Image: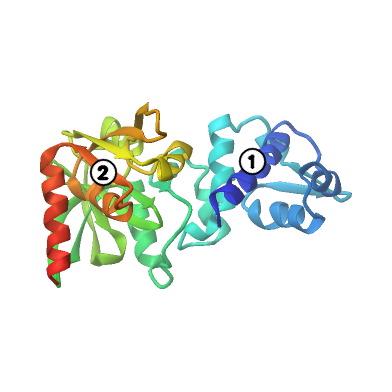
Amino acid sequence: MTDSHHETLVYRLSQILVKLNQGIKLDPKALADEFKVNLRTIQRDLNERFAYLPLEKVDGHYRLDPTFLGKLSTKDIERFASLAGVRGLFPSLSDDFLRDIFDDRMQGALLVKGHNYEDLRGKEKLFGALEKAIYDRKQVSFDYAKEGSLKTYAGIAPYKLINHKGIWYLTALDADKLKSFSFSKIQHLKILDTGFKWDANLDNKISTDDGIWHSDTQREVVLKASPEVAGYFKRRKLISNQVIEKELSDGSLIISAKVSHDNQILPILRYWIPSLTIISPDSLQAEMDKGLKAYLER
């Protein structure tokens, strides 16, 4: 699903939700005309994408159960529309999963960053167990596949399941350090009886961090994007915490970004060679050169 298609879909779903929230009876044919789509698309919106909603159908018109009227905030509408539009992001595609999103605490367990997704079929049970551990504020233990071996983690406090650029991660506290674990590398999960104290400020930090690299300290990186690729960086943020500092007369851009780890930005730099160059810091350029040298030697 392309970004533009997803944005159009979410806009349509959000507008339909606004109407439902206001108590308006919806005529599928009229909606199809309004949004310039065919009738089958609207019927799919109402019968499949919104299957988790308490909708009533009377004389061919749809309305929200009156007991729910006016209870959705603007934020709720945006969230529900987005989730309904990208159901493929979730290993569990059941309507029960989406109904759970209505619960405020369950909303806090998931965070989606990006519209593509990895296939996690066969791991729904593990995903659901982690989701429940977050909901219940229970510590977990698991084995983690890393560099060809398994490392055991115990007493981990799970905070979020994050989908970032198509890959699912568990963000959790290991002792006092915030870490992100690739979900697909987690094995032998155990939900412990030990609970943990939920830190609302930490939860907010995880939600607002741009990416899955978490650190109390960040350093600024300054880059130059050539005129040929400047448009890509102007249209959307391709680098975490990206800020366009200046547009030069030749059309190139000076871009700054605050990163927590070199691996947060090095893959992007390699992808955009030679159109993206490092201005500072020198240590990042040295790390970049080292990686390229090792590649050429192989």
| Image quarter of residue 87 | bottom right
Residue 183 in the figure: left or right of residue 5: left
**What distance separates the C-alpha of mark 1 from that of mark 2?**
37 Å
| Mark 1, secondary structure of its residue | helix
Residues under numbered marks 1 and 2 in contact, where contact means CB atoms less than 8 Å apart: no
Name the residue rendered at 22%, 41% in the picture: 278
Q: Nearer the viewer, residue 249 or 266?
A: 249
Which mark is in front, 1 or 2? Answer: 2
* Marks 1 and 2, the one that precedes in the sequence: 1
**Label drawn at residue 277:** 2
Judge whether 182 appears above or below 54 on screen. Answer: below
Label number found at residue 93: none
**Who's the residue at 37% across and 61% down the image?**
127
Q: Give the quarter of the image for residue 215.
A: top left
The quadrant the N terminus occupies is bottom right
Disc number for residue 11: 1
Question: What kind of element bears circle 2?
Answer: strand
Give the residue type that dot 2 points to: Thr
Q: Quadrant of the C terminus?
A: bottom left
Residue 67, position as x, y percentages in the image: 68, 36
Give the residue furthest to the right. 59
- Nearer the observer, 184 or 134: 184
Q: Residues within 10 Å of mark 2 (few under 14, many from 20)?
A: some
